[in-house]
Image (cartoon, grey):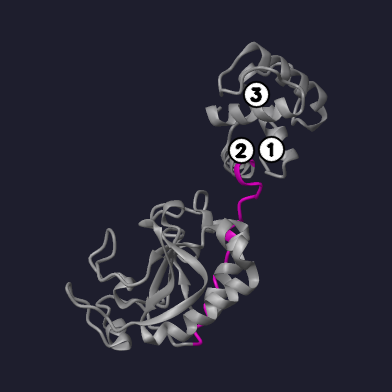
Amino acid sequence: MKQGAVRILQDVLTEMGRYNGPVDGQINGTLATAVAALIEDNTDRLTQPPLEWSDARKRVAAFQILCSDADCDPGPIDGLWGQLTEYAYLEMAHFRETGEHLINFRDIVPGNANPNGWPTDRPGQEELMDFFSYRPRQGTDPATVIVDCPWQLTLNWDRSAKTRRIGCHPKVADSLARVLHAIHDHYGSDAIQDMGLHLYGGCKSVRKKRGGSTWSTHSWAAAIDFDPDHNRLDWSWQHAHLARPTCMRFWEIWEEEGWLSLGRARNFDWMHVQAVKIP
């Protein structure tokens, strides 16, 4: 059983008044007593009588009981740590930290509308170059115009700097303005702050994709990053803040305008949204 799960077990049992030992993820006699009492009070929920179960198996069963009570489904309460219990542990840890359950990522079907006719990022990237009338090259820049954001942005790379101005490609400007106003209308300034959407990671940046050889969609000023520190490139939905259930409408608003979230589509780079499709 993972140390993090033991810590959660100790913490929840403390809240229930069943445990008064340290919450440190370490096994101790006080925890064993509390686990035994919890098991005894919930024997009808177990897959079999626990008469011959080891203390370790009883701890897993106790953790499964607490997960089930928190609507984090661990599967059968059998004291065996399998894939369902592993997922329940991830969800329980997330729930204890945020007060929210994980989204069912496999059930997500991102919107695939394209009312603005955004191009597709295919090998060679000729479609992007033709659509945006720009061939990326170091030392050059695409055409840009300013879109005013309805909430104040903090530059993620310089937290002392504030702005409401986003420089983007002229072809995406009207769509971007509609999206930003729709997000502000839906969430309001306070929720936007809580979600980290005020932390601006930039739009225009003429560079290659991180870990790739083709040009980033930022090179055409057709992509935006939000809160990079809490939505890192390699983070999946278990960790990225913008994968939380409260952010679902945020992504739907972008998708209704044809913008694409790499997080929603590929489960990485949840900070990033682009006015470019992928094959």
What is the magenta segment's predominant secondary structure? loop
**Residue at the extreme top:** 29
Relative to residue 83, is residue 170 depicted above or below?
Answer: below
Residue 257 at x, y = what percent? Answer: 52, 81
Q: Are dots 2 and 1 in contact, CB under 8 Å?
A: yes
Q: Which mark is residue 186?
A: none
Q: In this view of the protein, which residue sits in the foreground, 134 or 157?
A: 157
Q: Residue at x 61, y 46 (%)?
A: 98
Task: Please name the amino acid that badge 1 sits on.
Answer: Cys
Residue 226 at x, y = what percent? Answer: 45, 62
Residue 200 at x, y = what percent? Answer: 43, 63
Residue 7 at x, y = what percent? Answer: 59, 27
Relative to residue 123, is residue 79 depicted above or below?
Answer: above
Per the image, the residue denoted by label 3 is 59
Label 2 Cα neighbours within 10 Å, binned few <14 / some 14-19 / many ≥20: many
Spatial CA distance of label 2 from label 1 is 9 Å
The answer to whether 24 appears left or right of 213 in the picture is right
Per the image, the residue denoted by label 2 is 85
Specify which label sits upstream in the sequence, 2 or 1: 1
Task: Please name the amino acid that badge 2 sits on.
Answer: Thr
The answer to whether 71 appears left or right of 89 in the picture is right
Q: Is residue 279 visible?
A: no
Task: Please name the amino acid that badge 3 sits on.
Answer: Arg
Per the image, the residue denoted by label 1 is 67
